[in-house]
Image (tube, rainbow, N blue to C red):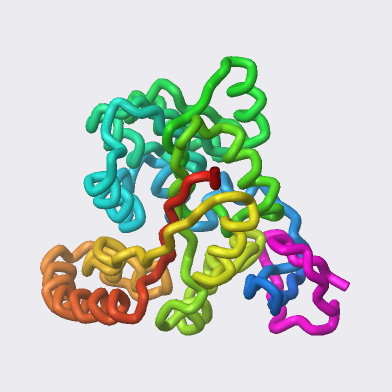
Amino acid sequence: MISCPSCGSSVSEDKFLRQHFSDIVKVEYKLYHCRSCDLEFWVPLVFIKSIYENEIIEEYSLWHQGEELILSDNHTTFINYLSHQNLIPPKKILDVGCGSGSFIKYLEKMGFEVWGIDIDSKSINVAKNKLYLKNVYNFSIDEFLDYAIQNNLKFDIITFFEVLEHQSDPVKFLNKISKLLADGGVIAGSVPNRDRLFAEFTRKINTKSDYDFPPHHFLWFSKKSLKFLLDKVGFEPEIFPVRVEKYMSAERILRYLETIGMKFGKYNFLKSLILLILRPVSFVIRSVYNISGGLGIMFVGRLKV
């Protein structure tokens, strides 16, 4: 029997949904569905740190070069949330999985005291040397928790965008997050929506990096399974969709077409013409995604009293 990493329920080992062989680590994975909490998870659940610095995934390569230093859709969704809540500076914020630091740099300019950690040392170097962020560390959550205890650190807000789906033990991860929260503190983050429109299509055509598969993504969340997990660990979560804006921009679509093999060369006129055609297409795609529930699922919550 296989144990669900969220609720602990048993799943029959031969009742897997699909298989996936990773060319990155030469391991075959099996996908299981837990009927108790609705989580889909891949086995073996073995976290491999090295894949985050090997640049097989395009976004990591761009972060290491100091490019793509822009806010993503989940970041802007959270900032819009901040503006409607009593979460105004000065507050101490920790971003777990901060990457090259563009999000916390923006928050720093808003007046927040920002901290960030990431297991990718190359991204942390960009955060320090290009964005001049001070409190950013190449730490795992375990290492930073030890550091925080030694230095009596607590945080008013802890964010972890597109991080939870990478965890081999999400309950343990969230318990450590809760230990870093100040009284009345808030968590916020996002995960990919496994039920998003065209999910299976994009998984099939994006074979270069296997972005949505292990050893990168171990957990596939629905709104139900995400809410269950957060509630189990002791949070009162608010769940809502991430609006699609920048992710499906014409420029991102063009770059994506190039990554899957379409060549446009260095002809600026041709690229400008293609972008002109793609802009109305981009608007329609974004509108359809937003109507259908978005690409990602956002969560915000406080610990239960």
Question: Which residue: 42% across, 83% down?
Answer: 198
Observer-nearest residue: 115 or 302? 302
Locate residue 304 relative to residue 215 in the image: left or right: left
Observer-nearest residue: 150 or 53? 150
Q: How many marks?
A: 0
Q: Residue furthest right?
A: 1
Observer-nearest residue: 102 or 80? 80
In the image, which residues are magenta? Answer: 1-25
Looking at the picture, how far across and down is residue 122, in whole percent? Answer: 50, 36
Looking at the picture, how far across and down is residue 188, in whole percent? Answer: 44, 48
Q: Please identify the quarter of the rendering in which residue 140 is found.
A: top right
Q: Please identify the quarter of the rendering in which residue 240 is found.
A: bottom left
Looking at the picture, how far across and down is residue 77, in whole percent? Answer: 30, 55
Picture layout, residue 148 above or below residue 141: above
- Quadrant where the image shows the C terminus: top right
Asked if residue 277 lies in the magenta stretch, the reply is: no
Question: Which residue: 41% across, 44% down?
Answer: 63
Q: Do we see residue 210 in this rendering?
A: no
Picture layout, residue 31 above or below residue 167: below
Asked if residue 24 lies in the magenta stretch, the reply is: yes
Looking at the picture, how far across and down is residue 293, in whole percent? Answer: 36, 75
Observer-nearest residue: 126 or 140? 140
Locate residue 189 relative to residue 88 in the image: left or right: right
Question: Which residue: 50% across, 30% down?
Answer: 182
Magenta: main secondary structure equals loop
